Every structure is written in structure tokens, then in C-alpha cells.
Image (cartoon, rainbow, N blue to C red):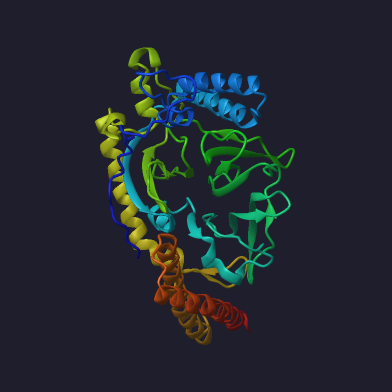
Amino acid sequence: MRFVTRISCLLLFVSTLPVYAQRGRSGAGQSAALSAEQLMQLYRFEEAAKELRLDIAAHRKAQKSTVRLEADLQRALQGADMLLGTEQVLFVDSFKVALSEVPATVRLSPGAGRLVDLATLGDSLPGLPAGADGWAYINDLGDRLYFSVPDTALCSRQLYAAGRLASGWTTPEPLPGVECEACSRQAPFVMPDGVTVYFAGQGPGSLGGYDLFVTRYNVETQQYLKAENLGMPFNSPANDLLLAIDEASQLGWLVTDRNQQPDTVCVYVFVPGTTREVYDVDSIGSEQLRQYARLHSMAATQTDQQALQLARQRLQEVQAASAQDEHRLHVRFVITDQLVYTDLSQFRSESARRIAVQWQQRQKELSAMQARRDELQRMVAQGRRTEPVVDELRQINRALPELRAQCNLLAKNMRIAETKR
């Protein structure tokens, strides 16, 4: 079982942000003005829009390009609209974790599926495009996989799905209707209805880097509908990377990097609303609304103590159940498309059982090696690129393909031995 450091994430904006004078608009003796981007980071979108309009006018007068400024203006106007629609959400808890620890941190109930690191699936995905990585979602039945891969034709990342076969997974296919030439889309999460998909998207319609969106499959057209931005507080001017809703536990999970260090995120647990209720700016004021939108304080959202205590109890139950069932959830012996074992005692063939034990051991070695590789890659990214670190990383990268091949061969032999008559 993997553990993470449990640190509450108070997403407080620093009051001493650097300020930059706007050229031509600050006279002698006047305080320097915040840039439009800084104003957006402070959720002062209307002020940012005003600054950008002045900049656009100045650029036009000087016959300079205004393309980037006009795009920023649209972002500011979008932010102002999103701010007024900030949803009332009860936040229960938060965890500050490394980006690679997200699948282990988001604990879902049985029936809600699970998040995995795409790299752990290795060579079991035939036809997987080069460069595919990140989080993948596997449904509760274990027969449907959703993930993101680079699309060289569109110069972006697109969402794909694959089905389970006895020998691995089918060739991945893009989700119909979700493709976007000017977008990158990652981290899909699918509701139990198999129709509703949440994902992180970057491009038109995004306020920050990545925003969270939802789309639904239309059975009649066999296409997904146009994705909708989830708005605030789920989205921000930063990267909002994952949203998962566990209907069984009545808990939601939000992953964001707002105000975090590189390769670090904050994972929030919240109570999904049955209806969407927004804050009344006339009652609470603009500054309080901004604090709710940017998740300034979880305590401010915890106005219903009874609902909070019940949610905390459900969270404890989910975490305890996840710890007890981790072995069962993560060790699945796939025999045929219709037959999946979760325990060694289910094998009828003693030979197949012995091979399954070997496969289990190799899988543990593979997981440990991949975890060590991720740790070394983080060290390199953080500037700790020493010769021993680089040498070990190279050795692991050379060893991983062979270990994955051993796992795949053992899995194949296990299935043959179990189904042999």
C-alpha cells in the first residue's frame, strides 16, 4: 500500500505579489499598477478586462498586433462570468501530494472504477501511440479503459478508449465527437452510467492552463456532446487536472496545481451537490465571492456541520475499505473476456496457480521499478541531476521492457494452463 504525506492545502494567495507598472498609465508618485495577468490571478477579472482594453487601444494606435491581448481579454470576460456563477460546494478535506501519487490518493468505492498510471499497463495495450502517459481510468467491470495520448496530426492530446480482451486490450480508438484541433484533453473519469465523462482540457473555453469539463454520450448520434466548462470553484487560472465523483460514497475528488510547487498538486475531497446552487454576490459581496471561487479556505465552505461530519465519516470508510481491498482491486487474473479471478483460490489448475504466483511477483517488481523510475525522474526535474541518479534511471529504463515482457508471457501461459482441457 502506498502512503502520501497528509498536509492540508490552504490555497492562500500571496498578498505580496510582484507588481509591474503599466507603461504610460502610471504617473510620477502613483503606485505601480498590477498587470492584467496578475489581476486575473487575483480573480479581479473586470479590472483585468479594463486594463486589456486600454492595452488593445494603445497597440492599435501604434499599429501593433492585438491577437494575444484580445485572447487574454476573452479569458478575462470568461473569468468574470464564471465568478458570478461560483457554485456552493462543501469541501471536506485536502491532501498535498506529488503529481505521481494522485492515483493512489483518490480512493474510490467499489463500483466507481479506479484510476491507474497508464505506464503500469505497459505492453498490454496494442497499438498504443508513442508518448502515451498520465492517468487512465478503468471502469468497475475492468473491461473499459479511458486515457489520453498525443495526436501528432492535431498537435495536441486527445481522449481514447479501449476494451478488454483475454490477451490485453483492443486497439485504442478516439472518443467520437470529443476531438479538438486546438485542444489538449487528459485525465478522463467516467461515471457508472458509462455516458458521462469528466476530463481536463486546455484550449478554447479554458480559463487557465487546464480546466475541467463534462460531456455526455448521445446514443442517437453515437457522438459525445459539446463539452461544458464546470466553472468555479472547480476551475481557476491555474491547472485543474482531474474531477471524479463517487456516487456510492457521495464524495467528489478535485485535483489542482493552483499555488503548488512544480510536480505537486492539492487533492480536495468535496460533497457533490444534487442541484447546482450559486452564491449571491449581493448578499456576500465581491471579495467574499472571490475567496469562495479560489478556495481561499475550506473552513469557510463548512457551514453545515452535520453534513460535514457525515462526509468525513464516509471518507474514512472509503479509505479503510480501499486499504483492505487494495490487493483485490489491483490484482486481477484475467482468464477470458468473461472470466476474471481476484484470488488464487479460484484457480482450478494447479499449474495455472503456480504461474499466477510468479506473475504476481513479477507485477510487484514491475510496480516497484516504475515507482523508483518516477522518483528519479522527479529528482532530475527538480535539478538533482547527479551522475548516480542518471545512471540508475538509465538502468531502469533498459530493464523495464524486459520485465513487462516477462509479465505478459506469464499472463499468457497462466490463461492457457487454466483454460486447457
Say which of 274 and 343 sits in front.
Answer: 274
> Residue at position x 63%, y 66% from top?
125
Report the side of 388 relative to 216 (left or right). left
User: Residue 165: where, in percent of width, then height?
Assistant: 64, 66
- Residue 150 lies, with reference to residue 182, above or below; the image says below
Residue drawn at 34 percent across, 56 percent down: 321
> Which residue is at 58% across, 73% downward?
335
38 left or right of 291 in image? right
Residue at the far top in the pictured view: 282
Which residue is found at the position 49% from the left and 54% from the top? Answer: 113
Q: Position of residue 392 (x, y in %)?
A: 44, 77
Q: Of all residues shown, which one is farthest toward the front? A: 28
Image quarter of the N terminus:
bottom left
How many numbered marks have been drawn onto this rendered protein structure? 0
Q: Which of the pair 410/206 is nearer the observer?
A: 206
| Residue 225 makes an appearance in the image | yes
Q: Nearer the viewer, residue 190 or 84?
A: 84
Please, is residue 387 above or below residue 295 in the view?
below
As drawn, is 105 to the left or to the right of 359?
left
Residue 198 visible within the image: no
Residue 301's place in the image compared with 381, above or below, is above
